[in-house]
Amino acid sequence: MRLMISGGGTGGHIYPALALIEALKKREPNSEVLYVGTEKGLESRIVPDQGIAFKTIKIQGFKRSLSLENFKTIGLFLKSVSDAHKMIKEFHPDVVVGTGGYVSGAVVFAASLQRIPTVIHEQNSVVGVTNKFLSHFVTKIGISFEDARAQLPIKKVVFTGNPRATQVASIKPNDALSEYGLKTNVPTLLIFGGSRGAEKINSATVGALPQLKQKNYQVLFVTGRVHYQKIMDAINPADLGSNVVIRPYISQMPELLPNFEAILGRAGATSIAEITALGIPSILVPSPYVTNDHQTKNARSLVKKGAAELLPEVHLNTDSLIKYVDALMTDEAKRQQMGMAAKKMGRPRAADDLLNVLESVIKK
Ligand SMILES: CC(=O)N[C@H]1[C@@H](OP(=O)(O)OP(=O)(O)OC[C@H]2O[C@@H](n3ccc(=O)[nH]c3=O)[C@H](O)[C@@H]2O)O[C@H](CO)[C@@H](O)[C@@H]1O
């Protein structure tokens, strides 16, 4: 298979694409892949490191209010469609896949104009702007939440789950925590705010450091790259216990994930796919800043099944963080129950199911 794939901006769009590529390489070691992203997006830091061919185009998001800037954006969009068009002519893909983010809009749209089979993957329960636009032109659409189906041309939709689930589900508990200075035999909590970090989660955690220091569990606190230095400068070293490790970003998240007893984090769709694939109990603090509050919907789907607890950002502070975290970290039976409920929702075959969709459109 010759696969051209594009997904950008945030980890939630990039990691599903990488997981799909990994599954394809397993199934077809001789397949050829070209990833198209932008220079500015997180993808330009992540994708080339994986040894995947990577090219960039320029693109810019639309402002929600009417502005002159939007005319520039339309101009840039047409230019990026034309750049993508040239890349497609050179690469000759059998199929072009988009996993979300503005850049995938230009690439997949260009492919559909050239009548090349196209597939998009929607990670969320509320369909993103780019995928909504592309849904009219593409051949097939993979979804991860049933709720997304009704928002899309139904005949094109296949429920696949999120390919990242397959990637993380294949990894067994290991001693990777020791590389971060953490013990491998102590219950461990991961605190993080999605791929870019979340200010409110960070500040509540910083406030909780003196109390966390006293606990008999340990914490890996991932701040997000842009927030790291400010946090480290503000922390009083006396507040930081040896059971708490702070990092800006974790590049090897799949290796680490099976080693956590619980997670406190955002409810981004790819994080949810990971939590359910591995059956990790979680306290979810949905971002209130996303389209149609979709992270709350993502989180509620787990809470409904007893797989997670919801801590709305308006109620998040140092006290509530400690209260929720303590209740979970000191109750193994509760963790087991939540973990089992989460695992029941996992889709460990998602990458294969999505690959099957790709094959089905190529054969047509
Ligand atoms: C603010 C925003 O727009 N968030 C959206 C974005 O979230 P975001 O990019 O945060 O996406 P998710 O929470 O879905 O996924 C984050 C991904 O980054 C990985 N990770 C994170 C931190 C780290 O240090 N290392 C690491 O590898 C996680 O393991 C996960 O695979 O895309 C998601 C998927 O479309 C949406 O559901 C979110 O609403």
Image (cartoon, rainbow, N blue to C red):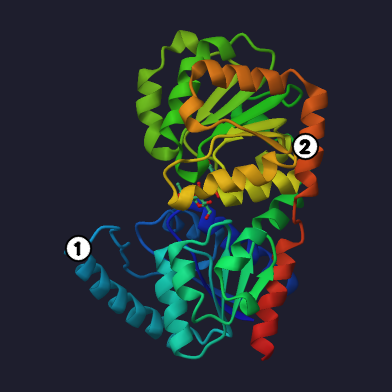
In percent of width and height, residue 98 lies at 52, 70
Residue picked out by circle 2: 339
Most foreground residue, 39 or 16:
16
In percent of width and height, residue 249 lies at 50, 39
Most foreground residue, 265 or 31:
265
The three-letter amino acid code for the residue at tag 2 is: Gly
Most foreground residue, 287 or 65:
65
Q: Is residue 270 left or right of residue 258?
A: left
Earlier along the polypeptide chain: callout 1 or callout 2?
1
Q: Residues within 10 Å of mark 2 (few under 14, many from 20)?
A: many
Mark pair 1, 2: CA separation: 47 Å
Label 1 CB sits under 8 Å from any ligand 1 atom = no
Q: Is residue 95 left or right of residue 276?
A: left
Residue 69: which disc?
Answer: 1
Which residue sits at x=43%, y=76%? Answer: 107
In percent of width and height, residue 274 lies at 67, 47
Question: Is residue 107 placed above or below 178 in the rendered structure?
Answer: below
Residue sticking out furthest to the left:
68
The three-letter amino acid code for the residue at tag 1 is: Glu
Which residue sits at x=60%, y=67%? Answer: 150
Kindly tell me whether residue 21 is visible in this rendering: no
Kindly tell me whether residue 339 is visible in this rendering: yes
Question: Is residue 112 placed above or below 351 in the rendered structure?
Answer: below
Question: Is residue 106 placed above or below 146 in the rendered structure?
Answer: below
Which residue sits at x=77%, y=37%? Answer: 339
Residue 307: which disc?
Answer: none
Q: Secondary structure at mark 2?
A: helix
